[in-house]
Image (spheres, rainbow, N blue to C red):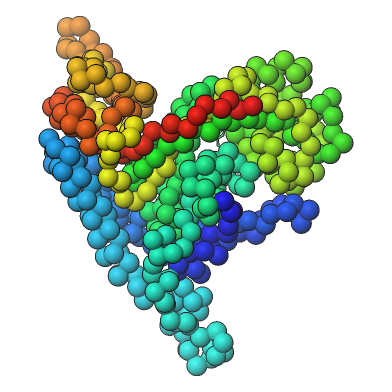
């Protein structure tokens, strides 16, 4: 896997402006990462806003159009969804076409062209600019949150071994990078065996229109990193991603460090920060690869509280994959119910009756309708919190049991969306070392 500057590989090359890397020349990489401003500044931003606005109706397409009774129904729901998204994007692309050519070529096309030197004249778009998909021969571009050396980059490499990994400064940007065709896939963490769920990504899965097309489970092996010559006694601060701090909580205490713990955006970013600012009182929790990339020493190795520390990542794409039944598949759904948690048992019994195992259940606040009032004047008013339930179950949408289970779930729920049906990660178990 290579890490690349997004601007070097994509069609519409000049749309993506890149930041100057903040680390110094002593650090071997100079890889800019995409940030939200860059995504929003793109002429395709309007397309994204359009897509977000379309969210409720698309979700309803799944709900009322039916997670049908058959595999064909489900596949056609996906196809309808995909074509809606594509046509909306095309419309928006058309409407902003003129501006795009101006921006692509980095020249203001509306100003007096005769003053532009010949070698700076706009170049015509080529088929390559319009065909960013890997099926056209280019390498798969995979967006992840963080900087090179982050575990998410390693997960992208595990999921797509020869991909171009594109660093993004926020999860939101990784979603947008795929929606705007800057990347072909995003690889995002959803849960860790010690730290629990990464709630932000559950919320974003619902807000965006991407499909889960796979999962990878990555053993996470943390190291305590500091500048060369720095010893543990010099430290008064440890910085890292909040998940990494949570995964090393007990070990940090056992190491006898008298330090404050501070959260930053990603583990490798913490290492980069220590190196770039020459911080001799601060250590970072990050990977051994981050130590190498940013020129830090490993003060302690394997500091996660449990050696079987695993983070589960999902792969996201613009299109769903065709569900298979000849290999183990998992399906992820999200639903809500007017009567909230009180009917959860009934909903889940649809899976139990069909011997379908659930592998994960997560609840998140129902932000459109956070409170449900129950009661009357005589007894008072109970205020129940409303939730969205995310469930992963061990069956493919190509399996008739799953189709029937979802048809039944649909009867009980006010909202239901299939986030994806995808192969389970069945790689042999290897602890993080
Ligand atoms: O900061 C990183 O290196 C990441 O890739 C993010 C992340 C996470 O969000 O959970 C990924 C894996 C580890 O669990 C720790 C951090």
Instruction: Determine the residue positioned at 57% across, 22% down.
Output: 308
The quarter holding residue 296 reads top right
Question: Depth check: 329 or 297 in front?
Answer: 329
- Which residue, as the protein is rendered here, is positioned at the far right? 229
- Which residue, as the protein is rendered here, is positioned at the far bottom? 114
Residue 332 in view, yes or no:
no
Quadrant for ligand 1 reads top right
Tell whether 95 sits left or right of 183: left
x and y, in percent, of residue 228 in the image: 84, 39
x and y, in percent, of residue 48 in the image: 35, 55
x and y, in percent, of residue 361 in the image: 35, 23
With respect to residue 65, does 23 lie above or below? below
With respect to residue 320, does 86 lie above or below? below
Tell whether 124 sits left or right of 369: right
Instruction: Determine the residue positioned at 68% across, 41% down.
Output: 289
Tell whether 172 sits left or right of 400: right
Residue 26 in view, yes or no:
yes
The quarter holding residue 150 reads top right
For the C terminus, the image quarter is top right
x and y, in percent, of residue 10 in the image: 48, 64
- Which residue, as the protein is rendered here, is positioned at the far front? 326
Task: Give the number of callouts.
Answer: 0
Instruction: Determine the residue positioned at 34% across, 54% down.
Output: 49
């Amino acid at each position: 896997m290579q890490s690349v500057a997004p601007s070097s590989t994509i069609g519409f090359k000049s749309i993506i402006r890149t930041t100057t890397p903040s680390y110094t020349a002593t650090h071997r990489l100079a890889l800019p990462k995409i940030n939200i401003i860059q995504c929003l500044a793109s002429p395709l931003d309007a397309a994204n806003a359009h897509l977000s606005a379309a969210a409720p109706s698309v979700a309803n397409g799944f709900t009322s159009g039916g997670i049908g009774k058959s595999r064909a129904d489900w596949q056609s729901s996906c196809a309808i969804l995909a074509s809606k998204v594509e046509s909306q994007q095309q419309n928006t692309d058309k409407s902003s076409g003129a501006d795009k050519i101006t921006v692509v070529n980095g020249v203001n096309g509306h100003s007096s062209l005769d003053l532009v030197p010949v070698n700076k004249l706009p170049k015509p778009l080529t088929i390559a600019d319009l065909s960013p998909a890997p099926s056209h021969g280019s390498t798969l571009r995979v967006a992840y949150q963080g900087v090179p050396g982050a575990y998410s980059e390693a997960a992208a490499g595990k999921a797509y071994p020869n991909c171009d990994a594109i660093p993004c400064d926020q999860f939101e940007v990784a979603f947008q990078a795929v929606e705007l065709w800057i990347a072909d896939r995003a690889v995002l963490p959803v849960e860790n065996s010690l730290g629990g769920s990464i709630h932000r990504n559950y919320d974003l899965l619902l807000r965006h229109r991407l499909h889960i097309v796979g999962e990878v489970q990555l053993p996470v092996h943390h190291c305590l990193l500091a500048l060369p010559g720095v010893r543990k006694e010099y430290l008064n601060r440890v910085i890292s991603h909040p998940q990494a701090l949570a995964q090393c909580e007990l070990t940090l205490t056992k190491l006898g460090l008298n330090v404050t713990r501070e959260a930053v955006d990603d583990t490798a970013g913490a290492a980069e920060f220590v190196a770039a600012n020459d911080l001799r009182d601060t250590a970072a929790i990050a990977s051994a690869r981050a130590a190498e990339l940013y020129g830090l020493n490993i003060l302690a190795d394997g500091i996660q509280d449990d050696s079987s520390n695993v983070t589960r990542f999902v792969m996201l794409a613009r299109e769903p994959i065709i569900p298979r039944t000849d290999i183990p598949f998992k399906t992820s759904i999200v639903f809500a119910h007017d009567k909230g948690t009180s009917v959860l048992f009934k909903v889940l019994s649809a899976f139990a009756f069909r011997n379908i195992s659930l592998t994960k259940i997560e609840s998140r606040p129902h932000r459109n309708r956070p409170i449900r009032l129950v009661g009357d004047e005589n007894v008072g008013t109970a205020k129940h919190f409303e939730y969205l339930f995310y469930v992963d179950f061990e069956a493919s949408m190509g399996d008739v049991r799953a189709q029937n289970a979802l048809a039944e779930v649909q009867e009980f729920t006010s909202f239901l969306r299939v986030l994806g049906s995808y192969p389970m990660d069945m790689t042999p178990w290897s602890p993080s070392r």
